[in-house]
Image: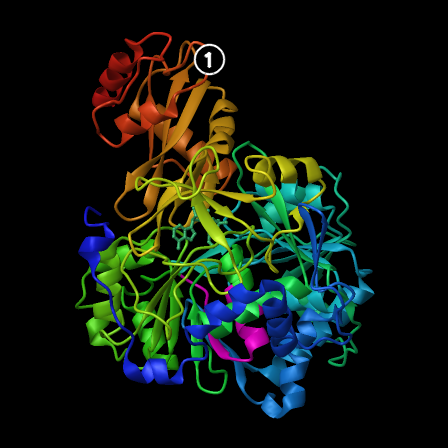
């Protein structure tokens, strides 16, 4: 990761054929800049089926609370399903599902509409109404997307909780969103084993103090589970017998579509709220402009789990609203062998692949002879998301996977932004390894210094978004003050993203990682504070500090430093127990790669932990300026303990 200067990476021109057929050309930027509101209104009317047209494009009279496409009415599920069937494309494959054990299922758009209608009827029978919330705790199976679309069809908001999260994490999300129904499965397949999900739901609801009335359970693995009388119902009993006809209602443009919890700088996850018309508009625009989607011929594959925003926007809503065929894969990339992804690309003739840099770096480690065994010639475009892609991984992706013919779009966005914000348009420019380049048409980003001045110096500054955008978050669920404070208080009327960035001499943007206490592990966002709270909750721990240390494969890795209570020994077993504890408490992705037991933590005179210094230790660097520490000898003690552990 040393060659990350623009001058050294070169640029890659798209093939002439790609340029000739591209959906969007370079002139789009100018048109959008001329009047960004008219631009978005035009995109929205072209890409979304509105049942009632909107009036005002943007109501920004009460910033930062935005309303887009005011007064318009639509149904998001109708846009993902019915309209394709009505247009005569009901026989087109919507989902090619590939289970980890090798089972597969195919749904055409007409079949998917029938399944979603059945589910919407079932949820209606269970009392779900527009404005309610439904929690979805499912693996990567078609029922997950079917459940999301059924909620959208009814105007109820879903809150998808990643299947890798613990019962406590699920519980706090169910309570915060006041979910009425939970949809889950008995379990799923991961690395050939059937892992369980339903027991976590039982544990989450065991205190009897939630608003959940019904748990709908999909049978995926057939493992034994407990069913609670009067509360739990099998999906195959309830949904399979429901009517496949469902007349949908049309809802306001600002009707909530989903809540998705993400880690912030404080312990409690934030419920990011997205609504309907603006979200769908920008997601669809990115499908057209960034992914250059051709619904009649493309086979799209976004490898993200639906539990993350990437899965919401580019597994469920984007591809289906665009009417393209897509691949959904349940499992891990190395089951039953390290060529599984490439086998899937070959089998379904994927044309567009969207993946995280951490996966690319893992494949690099496994060796290029693995993908070389498969026919990847169907691919025409590659995408990257979740964290900066280092130029070396970019070039490997371009050469080995893309056969030097596929442009790579490095897409920067966030749970909060809902859809792509910064990414090259593949038919309109040459791409540059390691840089997301520039904001998409209609979006205005900038890099400013600490005082908010633009341009920031050559060493970079903070990424901000200057104008509201259609798929922007509408708030933090039930916490308007935190919404203002987190994103809109640093600079006036400007969205503060929390990322460091710099521009090169071409004006292209390079990301420098988070500037707050948020870590990025394998493209997943984790909060240092949340993991610290988990460590401190363990009886062994007196104090804890957590940092994200640079890691070759996962981007960052969680490294904990803890002071244990008297009587607990500094042994490998203690450290292992603490790592396990976090894995159980929050979920396996949060499990620290290392826990160092130390006698002191570096603190300023005011008691603030200087994580920057711990990061130096974790990254095996010389420790930086420690002059503001209350006791500067502490760093020596810490380095000693770490060397021993
Ligand atoms: C954070 C958002 C976007 C969906 C997946 C993550 C980092 C995301 C990139 C990229 C550099 C990136 C940022 C951002 N990030 N994409 N292409 N280059 N950094 O969503 O969990 O909300 O995390 O991920 O730091 O703020 P998320």
- Asked which quadrant contains residue 563, the reply is top left
Q: Is mark 1 within 8 Å of ligand 1?
A: no
- Position of residue 271 measured from the top left corner of the image (x, y, whole percent): 63, 45
Taking the image as shown, residue 470 lies to the left or right of residue 4, namely: right
Residue nearer the viewer, 302 or 235: 302
| Mark 1 residue element | loop
From this view, report whether residue 508 is shown above or below residue 118.
above
- Position of residue 24 measured from the top left corner of the image (x, y, whole percent): 45, 76
Residue nearer the viewer, 590 or 394: 394
**The stretch drawn in magenta includes residue 501:** no
From this view, report whether residue 325 is shown above or below residue 603.
below
Residue at position x 32%, y 23% in the image = 613
Q: Quadrant of the C terminus?
A: top left
Residue at position x 49%, y 65% in the image = 441
- Asked which quadrant contains residue 448, the reply is top left
Residue nearer the viewer, 577 or 117: 117
Q: Is residue 194 visible?
A: yes
- Asked which quadrant contains residue 58, the reply is bottom right
- Position of residue 298 measured from the top left corner of the image (x, y, whole percent): 44, 81
Q: Is residue 203 visible?
A: no
Residue at position x 28%, y 65% in the image = 337
Q: Residues within 10 Å of mark 1 (few under 14, many from 20)?
A: few
Q: Which residue is mark 1?
A: 607
């Amino acid at each position: 990761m040393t060659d990350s200067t623009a001058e050294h990476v070169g640029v890659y021109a798209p093939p002439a054929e790609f340029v000739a057929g591209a959906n969007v050309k370079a002139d789009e930027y100018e048109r959008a800049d001329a009047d960004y509101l008219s631009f978005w209104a035009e995109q929205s009317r072209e890409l979304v089926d509105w049942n009632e047209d909107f009036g005002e494009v943007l109501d920004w009279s009460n910033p930062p609370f935005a309303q887009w496409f005011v007064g318009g009415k639509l149904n998001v599920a109708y846009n993902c399903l019915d309209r394709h069937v009505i247009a005569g494309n009901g026989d087109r494959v919507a989902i090619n599902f590939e289970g980890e054990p090798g089972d597969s299922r195919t749904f055409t758009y007409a079949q998917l509409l029938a399944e979603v209608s059945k589910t919407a009827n079932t949820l209606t029978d269970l009392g779900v109404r527009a404005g309610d919330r439904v929690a979805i705790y499912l693996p990567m199976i078609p029922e997950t997307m079917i459940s999301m679309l059924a909620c959208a069809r009814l105007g109820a908001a879903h809150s998808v909780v990643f299947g890798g999260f613990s019962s406590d994490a699920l519980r706090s999300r169910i309570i915060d969103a006041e979910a009425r129904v939970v949809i889950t499965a008995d379990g799923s397949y991961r690395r050939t084993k059937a892992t369980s999900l339903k027991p976590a739901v039982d544990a989450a609801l065991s205190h009897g103090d939630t608003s959940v009335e019904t748990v709908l359970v999909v049978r995926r693995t057939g493992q034994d589970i407990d069913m609670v009388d009067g509360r739990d119902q099998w999906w195959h009993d309830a949904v399979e017998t429901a009517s496949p006809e469902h007349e949908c209602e049309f809802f306001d443009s600002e009707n909530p579509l989903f809540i998705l919890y993400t880690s912030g700088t404080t312990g409690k996850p934030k419920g990011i709220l997205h609504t309907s018309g603006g979200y769908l508009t920008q997601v669809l625009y990115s499908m057209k402009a960034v992914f250059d989607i051709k619904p009649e011929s493309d086979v799209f594959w976004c490898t993200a789990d639906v539990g993350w925003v990437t899965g919401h926007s580019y597994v469920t809503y984007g591809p289906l609203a665009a009417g393209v065929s897509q691949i959904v894969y349940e499992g891990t990339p190395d089951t039953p062998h390290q060529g599984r992804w490439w086998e899937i690309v070959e089998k379904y003739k994927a044309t567009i692949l969207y993946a995280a840099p951490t996966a690319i770096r893992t494949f690099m480690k496994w060796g290029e002879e693995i993908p070389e065994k498969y026919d990847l010639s169907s691919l025409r475009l590659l995408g990257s998301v979740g964290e900066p892609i280092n130029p070396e991984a970019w070039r490997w992706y371009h050469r080995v996977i893309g056969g030097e013919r596929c442009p790579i779009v490095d897409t920067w966005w966030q749970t909060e932004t809902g859809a792509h914000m910064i990414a090259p348009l593949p038919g309109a420019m040459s791409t540059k390894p390691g840089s997301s380049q520039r904001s998409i048409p209609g979006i205005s980003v900038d890099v400013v210094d600490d005082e908010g001045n633009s341009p920031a110096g050559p060493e970079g500054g903070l990424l901000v978004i200057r104008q509201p955008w259609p798929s922007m978050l509408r708030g933090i669920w039930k916490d308007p003050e935190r919404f203002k404070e987190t994103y809109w208080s640093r600079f006036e009327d400007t969205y503060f993203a929390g990322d460091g960035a710099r521009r090169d001499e071409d004006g292209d943007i390079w990301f420098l990682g988070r500037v707050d206490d948020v870590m990025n592990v394998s493209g997943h966002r984790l909060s240092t504070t949340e993991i610290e709270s988990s460590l401190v909750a363990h009886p062994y721990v007196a104090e804890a500090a957590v940092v994200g240390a640079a890691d070759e494969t996962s981007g960052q890795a969680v490294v904990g430093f803890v002071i244990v209570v008297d009587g607990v020994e500094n042994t490998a077993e203690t450290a292992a127990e603490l790592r396990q504890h976090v894995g159980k408490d929050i979920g396996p992705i949060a499990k620290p790669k290392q826990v160092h037991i130390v006698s002191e933590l570096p603190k300023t005179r005011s008691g603030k932990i200087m994580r920057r210094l711990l990061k130096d230790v974790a990254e095996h660097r010389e420790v930086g300026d420690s002059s503001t520490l209350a006791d500067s000898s502490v760093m020596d003690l810490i380095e000693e303990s770490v060397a021993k552990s």
